[in-house]
Amino acid sequence: QDKLVESGGGLVQAGGSLRLACAASGAITRIGALDWYRQTPGEQREVVATIDSTDSTKYADSVKGRFTISRNSAENTVYLQMNDLKPEDTAVYLCNGNGLVGHTWRGYWGQGTQVTVSS
């Protein structure tokens, strides 16, 4: 099945770091533009970081200076390095990106990975 798969979530103390990965699987040969979202119960999904097809990046103000989005094309994976984590970063993190299958770009969502930051 063609999909994006997140990994790397977990439980970490405040001030700690995690690196999330969003990897293409199945017949997806390239990932284009991609957003990392986070969602907490009862809240709307929030875009925290974006990387476009030229590898230009943008960040939500709440994570600027602490999170870094990057791409490893050889691994067909987009990473989200999260440093100096705070309890308010606790959420399910999901990736949403364009994937190339054959000659067609399609949008894909990952299943999400839980990040919990304890105080």
Image: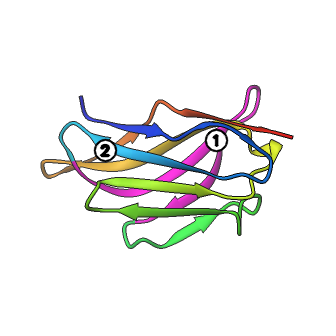
Secondary structure under badge 2? strand
Q: Does residue 38 belong to the magenta stretch?
A: yes
Residue located 57% across and 38% down the image = 9
Q: Residues within 10 Å of mark 2 (few under 14, many from 20)?
A: many
Q: Are marks 1 and 2 in contact (CB under 8 Å)?
A: no
The disc labelled 1 sits on which kind of residue?
Answer: Arg
Secondary structure under badge 1? strand
Counting residues from the N terminus, which is met first, the one under dot 1 or under dot 2? 2
Rendered location of residue 64, percent (x, y):
71, 66
Residue 23, label in figure: none
Residue located 78% across and 54% down the image = 15
In this view, the residue in front, 61 or 113, is 113
Stretch in magenta? 29-52
Q: Does residue 18 belong to the magenta stretch?
A: no
Q: Which residue is mark 2?
A: 24
Q: Residues within 10 Å of mark 1 (few under 14, many from 20)?
A: many
The disc labelled 2 sits on which kind of residue?
Answer: Ala
Rendered location of residue 1, percent (x, y):
24, 28
* Left or right of 72 in this view: 92: right
Q: Is residue 66 above or below residue 119?
A: below
Residue lying at the far right of the rendered structure = 119
Rendered location of residue 94, percent (x, y):
53, 39
Rendered location of residue 90, percent (x, y):
74, 38
Residue located 43% across and 65% down the image = 52
Q: Which residue is mark 1?
A: 38
Residue located 87% across and 40% down the image = 119
